[in-house]
Image (cartoon, rainbow, N blue to C red):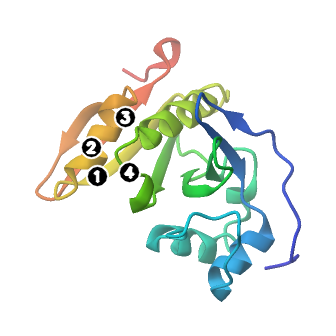
C-alpha cells in the first residue's frame, strides 16, 4: 500500500442505520497485517474483507468514489462489513459485492447498504446496470438482492445472476 493513512475523501453514503464510507489505505493495511481497530466489530474483518483489502493496491479504482466502502453501523460507530462496486463498468454494467459480519446478519443491513450503493452507481452516466452473481448454495445472498430491488436474470448449474437497471437506460 502506498500510504499508511491516506483517505480517498469521497462523500459518505448515509442510510437510516448505516454509513458507507471509503476504505483508507491504513485500514486495508491493518486488515492485511491482522491489526485490530477499536472501530471494528469483534468479527470484522471477514474473509471477503481480507480479499478486498489485498486487492486494493492492485485495483486503485476501487478506492475511488465508485469503488469499495466499509459498512459502518450508525448507532455503534463500528465497521460491520464492506460493500463495493467493481469499477470501472463494462459496457455500462457494473458488478456489486457485499458482506456483513456474522454478528450483524439478519438485521437488514446488507439490503439497506446494497440499495444505497446501487442508487449511487446508477446515477453515474456511464452505468445503466448493476449486477451480482450469487452461488446457488447461498440463498441468503439472493434474498439480499431481491430485497434491494434486483431481479433474477439468469441461472446456470451453480450461479444465479441478478441485476437492476436504470429505467431510462435499460439495455433491452
Q: Name the image quarter holding the N terminus.
A: bottom right
Q: Nearer the viewer, mark 4 or mark 1?
A: 4
SS under mark 2: helix
Q: Which residue matches tag 4?
A: 105
Mark toward the start of the polypeptide (2 vs 4)? 4
Above or below, 164 against 102 in this view is above
Mark toward the start of the polypeptide (4 vs 1)? 4
Q: Which residue matches tag 3?
A: 163
Q: Nearer the viewer, mark 2 or mark 1?
A: 2
Quarter occupied by residue 50 = bottom right
The Cα atoms of the two marked residues, 2 and 4, are separated by 14 Å
Q: Which residue matches tag 1?
A: 134
The Cα atoms of the two marked residues, 4 and 3, are separated by 22 Å
Q: Name the image quarter holding the C terminus.
A: top left
Q: Residue at x 58, y 37 (%)?
A: 117
Mark toward the start of the polypeptide (3 vs 2)? 2
The Cα atoms of the two marked residues, 4 and 1, are separated by 17 Å
Mark toward the start of the polypeptide (4 vs 3)? 4
Amino acid at each position: 500500500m502506498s500510504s499508511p493513512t491516506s483517505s480517498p475523501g469521497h462523500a459518505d453514503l448515509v442510510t437510516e442505520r448505516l454509513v458507507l464510507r471509503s476504505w483508507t489505505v491504513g485500514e486495508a493495511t491493518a486488515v492485511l497485517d491482522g491489526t485490530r481497530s477499536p472501530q471494528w466489530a469483534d468479527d470484522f474483518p471477514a474473509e471477503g474483507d481480507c480479499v478486498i483489502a489485498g486487492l486494493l493496491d492492485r485495483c486503485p479504482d476501487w478506492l475511488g468514489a465508485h469503488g469499495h466502502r466499509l459498512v459502518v453501523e450508525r448507532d455503534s460507530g463500528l465497521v460491520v462489513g464492506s460493500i463495493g462496486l467493481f469499477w470501472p463498468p463494462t459496457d455500462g454494467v457494473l458488478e456489486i459485492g457485499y458482506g456483513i459480519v456474522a454478528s450483524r446478519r439478519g438485521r437488514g443491513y446488507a439490503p439497506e447498504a446494497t440499495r444505497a450503493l446501487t442508487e449511487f452507481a446508477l446515477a453515474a452516466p456511464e452505468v445503466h446496470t448493476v449486477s451480482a452473481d450469487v452461488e446457488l448454495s447461498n440463498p441468503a445472498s439472493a434474498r439480499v438482492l431481491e430485497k434491494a430491488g434486483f431481479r433474477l436474470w439468469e441461472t446456470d448449474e451453480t450461479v444465479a445472476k441478478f441485476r437492476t437497471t436504470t429505467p431510462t437506460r435499460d439495455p433491452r
